[in-house]
Amino acid sequence: MEIVLLRGAAGLYLAATVAALMGIASIRRDFPHRLLMWLLGGGLLLHAVSILMRAVLVGHLPVANFGEGLSLLAALLVGLFLAVQLRGPLLALGAVIMPLAFGLTLAASVVKGGAQPLPDVLRSVWLPVHVLLALLGDAAFAIACSASILYLVQERRLKTHRGRGVLHGLPSLERLDSFSHNCLKWGLILLTLGIVSGIVWAHEAEWDSAWMADPKVLFTMLVWTLYVVLLQGRMTAGWRGRWAAQLTIAGFAAIVVSLVGVNLLGIGIHGKAY
Amino acid sequence: MQHRIVLVGLSHHTAPVEVRERVAFSNGHLEPALRGLLALPGVEEGVILSTCNRVEVLACGADAEQVAAGIPPFLSQLHGLGDDLLQTSLYVHHDREAVRHLFRVAASLDSMVVGEPQILGQLKEQYAVAAATGSSGRVLHRCFHKSFSVAKRIRSETGIAEKAVSVGSTAVELARDIFDGFGDKTALLIGAGTMGELCARQLMAQGTGSLMVANRTFERAIDVARELGGMPVPFEKLGRYLPLADLVIGAAAGDDFLVRRAQVEEAMRERRHRPMVLIDVAVPRCIDPSVHALDGVYTYDIDDLEGVIAENRGARATEAVRAEAIVDAEVDAFWRWFESLGVVPTIVALREKLEGIRQVEVERWLTALGPGCDPRQREGVERLTRSIVNKILHAPLTALRSHQSGESETFYVDAARSLFRLHGAPAGDETDDEG
């Protein structure tokens, strides 16, 4: 049943992808956008119910395997995207975010194994705190990355003096740039809190210090440093535009590598679960 | 026979400006002209449209030929022109085609610049004059209100009005791809000639935060700056003001570039690489085109603008096809209503209505009686009720028929429709068109 719901959500995300692309290409802006919001809302609802069912079944936040983790990440991504739209619509981002959400959800519904017990080492109240903060951070970085991708597309079009063509609904460079910047800030705050919660957890659980050499931890520190440097450059050295967009995308690429690499290979403490 | 709608007019498609300007009505002259129009034989309702691109007379009467024949001499006399001058320019549309023409005009599908928004306002004004004069009656009233709602619908459902087709608005449109809004932006106008001033005016109309004006003769810069609410800056010190400008309009032709690459590079550093848009409308160009290669700098010259304008014209044409489909559907809807106004459809509707009532009542009676009703009884009731209905209908139907094609046809049809509440003509049905 959860898998059916999850696939239903994936289907709606795919439809939302099409709607977002229509939104970019269309001259009429109202129709696909309203449609997109409904598809997103519907998809998220199915998705949330699916996660909830699994949570009730296993009795904790369902992150005991890779599929569950992907599913949660996709739901947080869509939720955050919807929340961002309420503050100020920037639906063109959906053209990047929705395929990503679709891919993640589909992958989750394919690899999602049966319910399995949580390893003892992870049984803690810190599990949901740490995981949710870290994943929300990842979602914020994903949205920042999507804005940066659209920035590069729009910038390339403007620099080559091409007409709008099918890219009719792309937002302005300024909007994309400042939006990406804001997402980065929030992402960094969430990621930092996620890291801190992880440290506190490790301290409370009195793990030996081997966790610090965990590949995921090392990779995350690398990503964190990159984003700090980028934000610092933005705020003091006036980094913006193309260079900032490229760095933002690079940062997210590193996150994807750490996600896929560490969790698929199952190394270290993060490899034990999501 | 029922009322007919006739449209006689000329426009930029059929008449040169020398003719149009002689036929155009100025403000005060519209009311007497409308009264004169109503005095023409056979004309029962009339509205005159007059803009710089068209003069059109929309009239309604029983005899279409008579109405159409009366209007050209009426126009010629009114403006003191020879009959043959207008003969080649005038076109005549009847009925559906007349309605379609009005809808197309209102939606700016027939305009010189397709999609321009002014025409609807002009139409509304001149219709208001006709309504106040009392020259527009029930048919034209509905026809015009419908044309307004069609125009609105086309505006919101198609992209016909979205594209810029002037240099100034195109410059703004291009800059919109880079800037989120203009409220916090500063524009620098270099060269305060006619073209430059026009561009700057459109920029300010879009809500640009502030404006600096530089011109070779400083006095002119002061004048234009005062006029547009900007600040004059010295022409020799352009480089110093460049970093402040988010948007530069270059409109001063000269032998050499006025804005050079080194200056822009320096300006970008000072601006901490906030993006900058430079639009060069001068021929020969006054902004070094190589600055476009700099990060965060976007330049457009007059050819780029023309390209966008041409592209937008094309896009408008595509949207116009969608708009025509909407017009078609709306003309059909209007025509269904219009046709229901005649005597024959009214008689049919009246018969149907009473027959419906009769059948319902007979059924009810039969049901109340239960199964104990024999066929002869039933037959008797049918005959009785039918005969009552026919007797009641006799007088009104005779009256309607005798006034068919007469002067008071509309009056009787209206009366019959509202007394018997026949569909298609509820009282005040025009009010749903205009919000």
Image (cartoon, coloured by chain):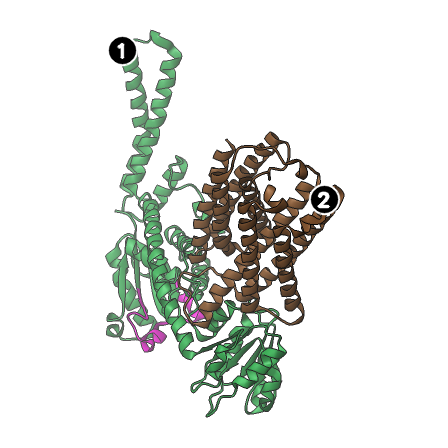
Chain colours: A brown, B green
Taking the image as drawn, is residue B434 in sight?
no
Q: Is residue B145 left or right of residue B376?
A: right
The spot of residue B110 in percent (x, y) is 34, 64
Q: Residue B376 bears which disc, if any?
A: 1
The spot of residue B50 in percent (x, y) is 39, 67
Q: Are marks 1 and 2 on the same chain?
A: no
Q: Residue at x 30, y 11 (%)?
A: B377
Measure the C-alpha gap from mark 1 to mark 2: 102 Å
Span colored in magenta:
B9-36
Q: Residue at x 54, y 65 (%)?
A: A246
**Which residue, given by chain and number where applicable, does mark 2 sit on?**
A207
> Disc 1 on helix, strand or loop?
helix
Quarter of the image for residue A226 reads bottom right
Q: Is residue B23 magenta?
A: yes
The spot of residue A10 in percent (x, y) is 47, 42
> Disc 2 on helix, strand or loop?
loop
